Image: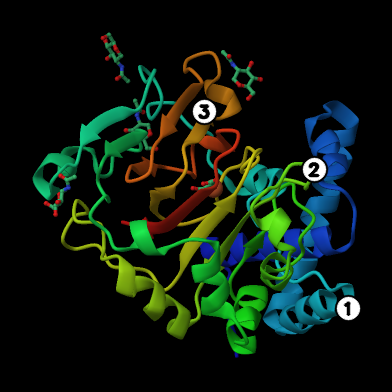
Amino acid sequence: MKKTMDENVLKENFLELNKIYLNSGIPLETLERVVKKKSTTIYWFSLVISAAILLISILYEYDILNSVRYILIYAKGVRCIVPNNYFVWEATRQISNCSFCINVSSPIILHNASKEEFLPYAYSSKPIVIKNAFNHWPAMKVFDFNFFKDLYYNNEEAYRSVDEECQFLHFKSDFTSLRDVFSMHKDRISNKPGKKSWYVGWGNCHPQILNKMRQYYPKPHFLPEDCEMPSKEYVFMGYGAGATMHLDFISRLMWQAQIKGEKMWHVRPAPECEQLCKNLSFSVDPGDAVLLDTRVWYHGTTIIPGQFSLSIQSEYG
Ligand SMILES: *[C@@H]1O[C@H](CO)[C@@H](O)[C@H](O)[C@H]1NC(C)=O
Ligand SMILES: *[C@@H]1O[C@H](CO)[C@@H](O)[C@H](O)[C@H]1NC(C)=O
Ligand SMILES: *[C@@H]1O[C@H](CO)[C@@H](O)[C@H](O)[C@H]1NC(C)=O
Ligand SMILES: *[C@@H]1O[C@H](CO)[C@@H](O)[C@H](O)[C@H]1NC(C)=O
Ligand SMILES: O=C(O)CCC(=O)C(=O)O
Ligand SMILES: [Fe+2]
């Protein structure tokens, strides 16, 4: 079966190359250093990358790539790879004209906005906080660590779906899978003094799991009528350092519901906009919605000390 090399295929190939790169065990910092160096190094680096793209394109034609990928994934025990790293981002993103961040010095704050109130901002790529948007969700009372632990309990298929099709993000914690998270000691779960703090996120894409989660919250009421619920929703939970600064390699805008705890968001524009735009920091409380174009705004989070944070996140557009 012949496949054409369009822009999407090229992007896919970059992602594959990136996964193979990460699986090879070379730290990302090494690559970053190389990319940042000028002149001859960058020249050689471009040559290597071009050759790699060519090779990957050939592999793609014969569908060898998928097999290689799975062999690598199983061989190394690396189950989930974060595609949103410096390399993919540098290789595929468009240099921005900074119009999304010029004049932005704080998020737009709305108060439990209706569809009509939200619509003018819905596709603006400006950071938005909607206060008290989700206080009425049953999830606000029901969701906690044990809710999700029970959801996955003894469901091998659901765990596997996180490992294989979905995504597990360990940030700075030492977990390698959702199984590890749900089998941690109870003193660590509640972040007792002396216990290592932890923060993780994962994609829920198992239909049965998604279905059960969604019994406790509807599609956010302020989103435009015509946007669909995707087949994957993220949960972020834990303490302390939160999510490290990153960009997301996703195709749409995102909304996030802060369910538990007070969280600080640290947001900054792409490097080429540093002179024109500002860094932002803002906090959210339980019940608040955050809307951020995580494809153009670098973002990281920190949790207010002593609090347990839990959020649900999805895409729209
Ligand atoms: C900047 O880029 C955005 C989208 O990338 C585009 O819609 C806008 O027209 C551009 N603005 C200017 C002034 O070029
Ligand atoms: C930024 O604000 C200035 C002054 O209010 C205005 O002239 C300019 O058009 C704005 N630029 C953008 C991209 O919104
Ligand atoms: C927010 O708006 C929704 C939809 O109109 C409503 O059901 C909910 O009660 C409101 N919440 C608050 C705290 O006002
Ligand atoms: C914005 O944040 C980055 C790191 O997160 C920092 O390097 C940079 O200096 C900050 N810029 C400003 C204007 O504070
Ligand atoms: O909520 C967090 O801690 C991180 C969220 C995130 O990375 C995102 O919204 O894309
Ligand atoms: Fe993100």
What distance separates the C-alpha of mark 2 from that of mark 3?
36 Å
Element assignment for label 2: loop
x and y percentages locating residue 275 in the rendered image = 54, 13
Residue 125 vs residue 207: left or right? left
The amino acid at mark 3 is Pro
In this view, the residue farthest toward the bottom is 1
Q: Which residue is mark 1?
A: 75
On screen, residue 172 above or below 315: above
Element at badge 1? helix
Name which residue lies at 72% across and 56% down: 187
Disc nearest the viewer among 2 and 3: 2
Q: Is residue 285 left or right of residue 91?
A: left
Residue at the spot 48% in from the left edge and 24% down from the top edge: 281
Q: Nearer the viewer, residue 292 or 168?
A: 168
Q: Is residue 296 left or right of residue 84?
A: left
Q: Which numbered disc covers residue 194?
A: 2
- Looking at the rendered structure, the kind of residue marked 2 is Gly
